[in-house]
Image (cartoon, grey):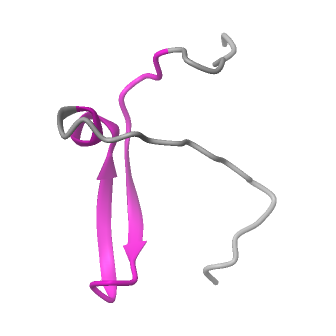
Amino acid sequence: MSEIRLGAKVPDFELETYEPTKGDFGTFSLKDQIQKKRWTILFFYPADFTFV
């Protein structure tokens, strides 16, 4: 597995999210963010799962 560095291209992915504005679950797609020309910051902290 190679490292991902600042400014590097990230492989496309899709994940389930909770959207508080809708009060329901939704889907986040990196492909959609790129198509909408939105800046995206990816932050993963696997030791914390505060949604429970």
| Residue 30 point in image, percent of width and height | 34, 38
| Residue 29 point in image, percent of width and height | 30, 45
- Magenta range: 9-34
Q: Could you say which quadrant of the image residue 3 lies in?
A: top right
Query: From the viewer's perspective, is residue 40 above or below residue 45?
Result: above
Q: Could you say which quadrant of the image residue 40 lies in?
A: top left
Q: Is residue 31 magenta?
A: yes
Q: Identify the residue at horizontal 64%, vertical 19% (top origin).
A: 4
Image quadrant where one finds the N terminus: top right
Left or right of 38 in this view: 51: right
Left or right of 38 in this view: 2: right
Q: Identify the residue at horizontal 24%, vertical 35% (top origin).
A: 37
Residue that lies at the very extreme toward the right in this rendered image: 47
Q: Identify the residue at horizontal 66%, vertical 17% (top origin).
A: 5
Left or right of 38 in this view: 44: right
Q: Nearer the viewer, residue 26 or 41?
A: 41
| Residue 47 point in image, percent of width and height | 81, 59
Q: Nearer the viewer, residue 42 or 37?
A: 37
| Residue 36 point in image, percent of width and height | 19, 40
Residue that lies at the very extreme toward the bottom in this rendered image: 23
The number of callouts visible is 0
Q: Identify the residue at horizontal 41%, vertical 74% (top origin).
A: 18
Q: Is residue 20 magenta?
A: yes
Q: Nearer the viewer, residue 24 or 7?
A: 7
Image quadrant where one finds the C terminus: bottom right
Residue that lies at the very extreme toward the top in this rendered image: 2
Query: From the viewer's perspective, is residue 4 above or below residue 24?
Result: above
